[in-house]
C-alpha cells in the first residue's frame, strides 16, 4: 500500500474516539446483535458473521516476501492487501484525508501536547503491542513465513532504546506500566490468534504499516519538540518500502488460502485495529 495511504491511516486512527468501555474489567461477551463498534472488548467475536462476504477469486502465489524485488509502478492486481484491505482502511479516514473517508475531522497533530510523560506512556504501550504481535506471530505455525518476512520491521529493540533515552533526558520520570486498555488489547490479540488468524493478521498489518508510514510523521513532531530533532528508534527503518513489501507479499500469500468468509473476518477487524492505534496515540495529545 502506498505510504500516503498509511500516513492518513495513522491520523485517522488518532481521530477515532476511544469507546467508553475501553479499559473496563469484565469478560468477553458472547455473540449478539450488538454492533461491533459498540464494544472494544467484543472485537474477537465480531468476525463470526458471514453476512456480506466478498466472493473474491483466490489465485495461488509462489513467491515469498523475503528478498522480493519490486518493479517500479507495478502492483499485483489480485492483491488482497492492495484492494480489499485498502478499501476497508480508507473508510476510516476523514473527508479531509480522503474522498472515501467517513470520519469527523481530528485535532491537527501540531496542536498535540507531546509531553515527556505522554511520550513515555506512548512508548511503553507501543512496546506492549509490538511485543504481543511478535510473540503471537512467532508461536503460530501458519504465520511462520509472515514472521520471517518481518525481521527488518520489528520494533522492540528500538523502542527499548527510546525508553532508556527518555529516562536519561528526563530523569525525574518514572517508567509506567502499560495502560489498562493496552493490556486488554494485547490479551485480545493473543486470544484472537487462537480462533481467528485472519483477524489477527489485520491487526498485525495495520500496526506495522501505520507505524512505518504515517507514524514517522508523528514521530517527527515528537523528536522536534522533545529531542532536538533526533529521530526515535521506533521510526528508523532501512529502505522502508522494500521491507514493508515483504510483509505485504506474505499476507497476500495467506489470503490466497483463505475462504471468502475468512477474508471477511480479516476486513471486519479494521475498525478495531484503528481504535486500538487511537488509544495508544491518545497518550501524545
Image (spheres, rainbow, N blue to C red):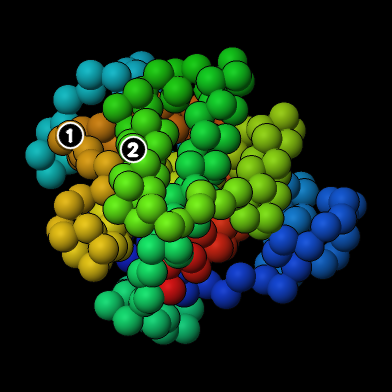
**Within 10 angstroms of label 1, few (less than 14), some, or many (20 or more) residues?**
few
Answer yes or no: is residue 238 visible: yes
The residue mark sitting in front, 2 or 1, is 2
Query: Label 1's element?
Result: loop
- Based on the displayed image, in which of its 4 quarters is residue 31 positioned? bottom right
Q: Residue at x 73, y 36 (%)?
A: 191
In this view, 91 is above or below 168: below
- Based on the displayed image, in which of its 4 quarters is residue 188 positioned? top right
Name the residue tied to disc 2: 161
Please name whichever residue, 130 or 50, is drawn nearer the observer in this view of the structure.
130
Residue 199 percent location from the top left of the image? 61, 42
Name the residue tied to disc 1: 238
Left or right: residue 179 compared with residue 153: right
Total numbered labels:
2
Residue 35 percent location from the top left of the image? 75, 67
- Based on the displayed image, in which of its 4 quarters is residue 116 positioned? bottom left
Amino acid at each position: 500500500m502506498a505510504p500516503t495511504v498509511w500516513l492518513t491511516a495513522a491520523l485517522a486512527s488518532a481521530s477515532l474516539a476511544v469507546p467508553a468501555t475501553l479499559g473496563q474489567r469484565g469478560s468477553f461477551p458472547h455473540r449478539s446483535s450488538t454492533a461491533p463498534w459498540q464494544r472494544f472488548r467484543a472485537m474477537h467475536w465480531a468476525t463470526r458473521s458471514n453476512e456480506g462476504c466478498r466472493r473474491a477469486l483466490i489465485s495461488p502465489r509462489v513467491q515469498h516476501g523475503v528478498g522480493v524485488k519490486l518493479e517500479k509502478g507495478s502492483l499485483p492486481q489480485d492483491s488482497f492487501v492492495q484492494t480489499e484491505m485498502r478499501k476497508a482502511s480508507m473508510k476510516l479516514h476523514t473527508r479531509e484525508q480522503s474522498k472515501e473517508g467517513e470520519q469527523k475531522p481530528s485535532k491537527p497533530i501540531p496542536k498535540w501536547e507531546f509531553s515527556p510523560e505522554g511520550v513515555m506512556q506512548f512508548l511503553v504501550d507501543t512496546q506492549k503491542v509490538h511485543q504481543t504481535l511478535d510473540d503471537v506471530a512467532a508461536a503460530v505455525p501458519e504465520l511462520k513465513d509472515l514472521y520471517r518476512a518481518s525481521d527488518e520491521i520489528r520494533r522492540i529493540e528500538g523502542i527499548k532504546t527510546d525508553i532508556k533515552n527518555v529516562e536519561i533526558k528526563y530523569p525525574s520520570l518514572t517508567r509506567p506500566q502499560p495502560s489498562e486498555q493496552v493490556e486488554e488489547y494485547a490479551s485480545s490479540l493473543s486470544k484472537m490468534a487462537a480462533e481467528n488468524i485472519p483477524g489477527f493478521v489485520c491487526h498485525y498489518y495495520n500496526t506495522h504499516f501505520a507505524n512505518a508510514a504515517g507514524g514517522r510523521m508523528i514521530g517527527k513532531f515528537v523528536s522536534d519538540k522533545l529531542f532536538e530533532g533526533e529521530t526515535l528508534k521506533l521510526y528508523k527503518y532501512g529502505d522502508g518500502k522494500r521491507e514493508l513489501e515483504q510483509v505485504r507479499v506474505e499476507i497476500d500469500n495467506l489470503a490466497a488460502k483463505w475462504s471468502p468468509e475468512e477474508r471477511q473476518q480479516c476486513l471486519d477487524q479494521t475498525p478495531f485495529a484503528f481504535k486500538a492505534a487511537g488509544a495508544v496515540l491518545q497518550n501524545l495529545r
